[in-house]
Image (tube, helix red, strand yellow):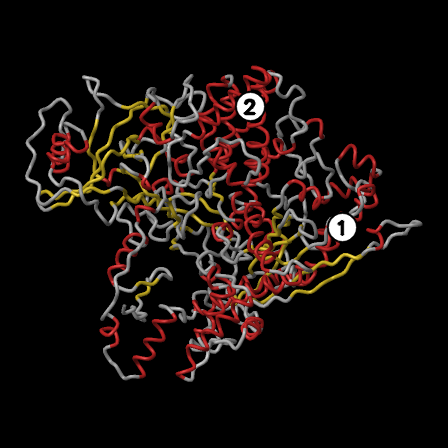
Amino acid sequence: MQRPLYDVHRLPCPSCRRVFRNTSGLTQHYNTFHSRPHGHVLPAPLVLQPTPRRAESVPPNQPHHIIAPPDDPGALNTLNPEGLYYEFHSELDGRPCDSMGVLLPDANVKPPPRARLETDWSPYDTRLEFETAEFLFQRVKMGQANVDLLLELWAASLVPYGGRPPFASVQDMLQVIDSTAIGDAPWTTTTAKYMGRLPPNPPSWMVGSYEISHRNPLVCARNMLMNPDFSDEFDVAPYREYDGLLKRQYTNLMSGDWAWKQADLIAVDPETHGAMFCPLILGSDKTTVSVATGQNDYYPLYLSLGNVWNNVRRAHRNAVVVIAFLAIPKTEKRYAKDPVFRKFRRQLFHSSLATILNPLKCFMEKPDVVRCPDGHFRRAIYGLGPYIADYIEQVLATNTVQGWCVTCPTPRESLGEQYKGPDLRSREHTELLVDGFDLKTLWDDYGVVGELIPFTNDFPRADIYQLMSGDLLHQVIKGCFKDHLVEWVNEYLKLTHGQTRGNEIIDQIDQRIAAAPAFAGLRRFKQGRDFKQWTGDDSKALMKVYLPAVVSFVPPDMARALSTFMEFCYLVRRSVQTEDTVAQIKDCLQRYHRLREIFRTSGTRPDGFASFIRHHSIDHYPGHITNYGAPNGLCSSITESKHIKAVKEPWRRSSKHNALDQMLRTNCRVDKIAASHVDFTARGMLEGTCLSEAVHSFVLTEDNDDGDGELEEGLADDKPGSEDEQEDDAVDGVRVLGDVSLAKQYQRYYPTTIHRLSKHIRVRRFKQLVSRFIYDQTHVDPLPDDSLTPPLPTLHGPIRVFHSAAATFYAPSDLSGIGGMRREHIRATPRWRKGLPRYDCVFAEKDSSLEGFCGLHAARVILLFSFTCAGVKYPCALVRWFSPVADKPDDLTGMWVVEPDVNADGSPSFGVMHLDAVLRAAHLIPVFGDAFIPASFHFSQSLDSFNTFYVNKFVDHQAHEIAF
């Protein structure tokens, strides 16, 4: 049998790194994943200057058009409501300078060219060397013995041609990686030990030494600042953002009041004018890499730039780096609660951070000339920014007694009451307390650990209490919701109905959760929520489906309390916060504090809520938003996700013996490869593929002037993955309100005439519905419902049926691509993944002048199809309509309740609509009422088995913003 030859021809996708063997595969891939939506494009933000200013004072990398404000302030009311108004800080405005720090007279001048040439692959010799190292070390993480074996096989294949593989051995490859200059931030080790007076027979922790491995944070900050990958998602100055009606908006860190106030303090020195303020975000969190015995817990410290936008930090695009592994002092159990040991442990933390961050100190008051992502030089002034941490880390960083609030001095016994403000902890206030009271009084009456000094006291303008920015994951999602409210509901059920019946109800709640209909991105709880190992994603997924499952088992005020808290949670997790959302958050907090009393009066929490510090912490979120922008850019989920790349994967690649040194080397190498990749990409050196470049070079050396034609010959067919198997994904592209398009491949074996298709789908009036649809599409006034259906025009060509459609829409608060775009797939298939049927629901436009769900239809898609009539192709959906049962959302859940429409004879009410009327998928979840859900019930039956449904606005953030 003749074996196929390896085909060297490749066609790269211009929008991503995938490659294809033929134009057909490339075209199908591009149309599926990178096609430009044809929906309504959102207008570009409009940027106004509040006062006449020098042209060079406006940061040149802001991606907005700058115009002068109208003379009449009232004219702002006529602006496009999508327009934005930016006020940049007038002194610390991030003006470009030359490499010596001299401000440029023209801020719009092009940045100086980068020194390296487009042919310089150093320290690698060729592209092949770099991509081989990247593939083996970073992508597949191949073991060293296997790399040597691969290189040996590679060398064997090249012997007849006198060639050799890109590396002589795995050690050769590692040495080349290690010699990379870009992205280099070497590790060093500092040793600490107890310096106090030793008692007779001192415990081991007093005589031991503790190693802190760390990098120079100044080098790490400079490396991030020069990363060209951030050029379009980077703020060079604090700013205030307003919408077209002059209402304040809060997004990234630099849009908040804290950054502006820091710039005011810096600008007191005239020498700093024109500089760029660079807040340094820190985060720390212990993590365990294995449950086995030995050294398996590590204490990483992370660093990020506050200038980088929140979406970049959340996407982990090299915007968060590990800069230290802190020591974890341990001792015998008998000394674990020894005050001296506990003081030493706290002091070691603060001394370590002060030592690690010390190289930054000299550039916190005078500028450091750095190169920025856009290629310009600027004079950077650093400052300690928000600290990402869970509550345990917060009390450690602030020297606060556990059980007290780290943000305000509210007495511990009063934490159950709503915080009214304005008192907040501050460095000055704490220092006054320390000067005026003894240590016991400080501990008992003020929650202050008075014998220690926070590490921030060593740095200018740094107040550790101001830098505690809140933690959505541990305070709100896992803390208040999963650990408190869900458990309180379970306790209430057992207290009210007894242990046996209470557990039966909890089991029924689990069955209801498992019965939630399918939806893109919805985590499936096949066995309900009763499992041990919870993650943050599990808690978020439970929040999406919990309320409809529990509402009929709890008192009305308990359901309202759950609904109000979830409303608060979804509001604070939005990526764009406004004055209106901050007001809504405050209103939710006020209502929640009143409604949660049901847990006290029902006996579930008879002692109140003073001991639940995480419940108290949510009162501070309005202040966190106005100070630091949207909280999702400073969530501990960012550092927890970084644990995987910075700690757990390097540990798995180590020998497990003295693993830390190996982990540090792995982190260094990963950073260097990533920095090289960004650098080569910025210089246009990674276009196409390594193979296509080699073929092109070979063609050029053969003096073939028709190389493109040669590449098209003899290409084998590619079989791209079916788009029908895709669920949802972040996408890059033009920002649109919404766009829905049919799958690129129609389904065969369906009838192609309207009469036969009508019988196949068992919709008797399908022909009349299509006829009415065509009439409405071709006439200005729609056909009245009670009028006779006009005859069906002639359809040109067959009717094509599709099993999916792709909806692309703007959803910046959800997982989204550059520009905030997200794509999900709408299903209408009799066999989803070779299993049971799946017919999704959608939102469709009804009246754009109305807000929320009042302006939308809810419908279930029965068939996706297209046809051509009079030369026009119509992509359509046959849907079953739903209508609200009331003229407002349900009082208990805050969600709209809908029911399927029926005709006068009781038959289902169907309709045909153009896909342009569809906004995106909708999630309808049954109103279970008193229904018993057996364990054998499958979620695919839910939409057919109940009469009324909640329009689930909690299924994702974009649904929450449109289905209120």
Amino acid type at circle 1 is: Pro
Crowd around label 1: few <14 · some 14–19 · many ≥20 (10 Å):
some
Q: Position of residue 396 (x, y in %)?
A: 71, 44
Residue closest to the far front: 1
Q: Is residue 610 left or right of residue 252?
A: right
Crowd around label 2: few <14 · some 14–19 · many ≥20 (10 Å):
many
Residue nearest the viewer, comparing 703 with 785: 703
Q: Is residue 4 above or below residue 535?
A: below
Q: Residue at x 69, y 65 (%)?
A: 188
Q: Which mark is residue 409?
A: none
- Give the residue at mark 2: 489
**Disc on the earlier residue, 2 or 1:** 1
Q: CA distance from mark 2 to mark 1?
A: 39 Å
- Give the residue at mark 1: 329
Q: Position of residue 248 (x, y in %)?
A: 47, 41
Q: Residue at x 21, y 28 (%)?
A: 910
Q: Is residue 840 above or below residue 6?
A: above
Residue 375 visible to the viewer: no
Residue nearest the viewer, comparing 435 with 633: 633
Amino acid type at circle 2 is: Val
Is the N terminus in the top left, top right, bottom left or bottom right quadrant?
bottom left
Q: Secondary structure under badge 2?
A: helix
Q: Is residue 185 above or below residue 156?
A: above
Residue nearest the viewer, comparing 626 with 925: 925
Residue 465 visible to the viewer: yes
Q: Position of residue 453 (x, y in %)?
A: 77, 48
Is the C terminus in the top left, top right, bottom left or bottom right quadrant?
top left
